Image: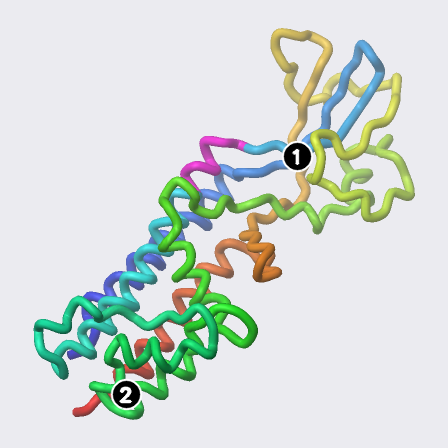
Amino acid sequence: MGFRIAKSKIERARELISEIDTLQAEFPAYTYCLETDTQKGQRATFAKVNQTALDKLVIRCGDVFHNLRSALDQAYFEAVTPHIPESSFGAIQFPFAKAESKLESTIQSRLAHKVSDGFVEVIRQAKPYAGDGGNVLLNLIHEINIIDKHKLPIPVGDFTRISSEQLRSQVPDFPQGIVNCGFGCNGRDVVWNGRFFDVNSLGHVVPPTNTLFHKVLDVPVGLNFSFPNEMYFEPVVDTLNNMANEIERILTLMLKSMPK
């Protein structure tokens, strides 16, 4: 017994994470742009989403969550079933509780105690429960996998690293002295008037007009998961890698705690 199938699922999850990282680098889901209206003499900056690229990322993120949760359940099933009758197999899945106070009863109902005391302690220390003190990454994997596939969490653009100084280096007439203006939070974040434009730096014209131009700016736009209930706002790739690491860690401890 070595959790071979579970480990293969984690390996597949890591392959998908690598794909997500590559996709975001080559086809960003979110960009930050400059709009110039030469007729009105008006400029603005705004966030833009590439829906096709975002859809590709969402699908892969969903597959990562599924593979990691599946790896956890597969390993748990492999660990527990040798110690129980086949008639009890239907109760076997990794024990997640709605609160810390419910964890012990959940562990009992999922028959972890049939393996060993050390095995039960590994489950306790993993803190697979919601709320204060719970394992946030582990519980996010659980919660996302019980949500309908059409409601998978949508990664959001992280525009917090954009500064007015960065924008002025590429758009010299961008207004000075703007601090904490909430880049990326609105349809148009900053709007200002101007009359003298370098036509070679306006970007591409937006049909059907011949006076409206858009240009993608070279500024850092991250890709984050946002889970307000958990006050969680962290990069997608880092989150997924940390989740995979956490599942691997728990599986390693489970293996060590099992009877030889």
Q: Locate the N terminus and report the quarter of the image it occupies.
A: bottom left
Residue 256 badge:
2
Main SS type for the magenta part?
helix
* Mark 2 nearby-residue class (10 Å; few <14, some 14–19, many ≥20): few
Label 1 neighbourhood size at 10 Å, few (<14), some (14-19), many (20+)?
Answer: many
Residue appearing at x 76%, y 20% in the figure: 36
Image side of residue 204 versus residue 69, left or right? right
Q: Seen from this angle, which residue lies furthest left? A: 86
Res. 200 image quadrant: top right
Using the image as rendered, state which of residue 20 and residue 151 is in the foreground. 151
Q: Which residue does the image show at 50% across and 73% down from the upper left? A: 134
| Residue topped by disc 1 | 47
In front of the other: 22 or 250: 250
Q: For this rendering, which residue is in front, 92 or 14? A: 92
Residue lying at 40% horizontally and 71% vertically, measured from the top left: 97
Q: CA distance from mark 1 to mark 2?
A: 49 Å
Q: Is residue 175 above or below residue 113?
A: above
Residue at left offset 61%, top offset 10%: 207
Helix, strand or loop at disc 1? strand
Stretch of the chain drawn in magenta = 50-57
Left or right of residue 72: residue 58: right
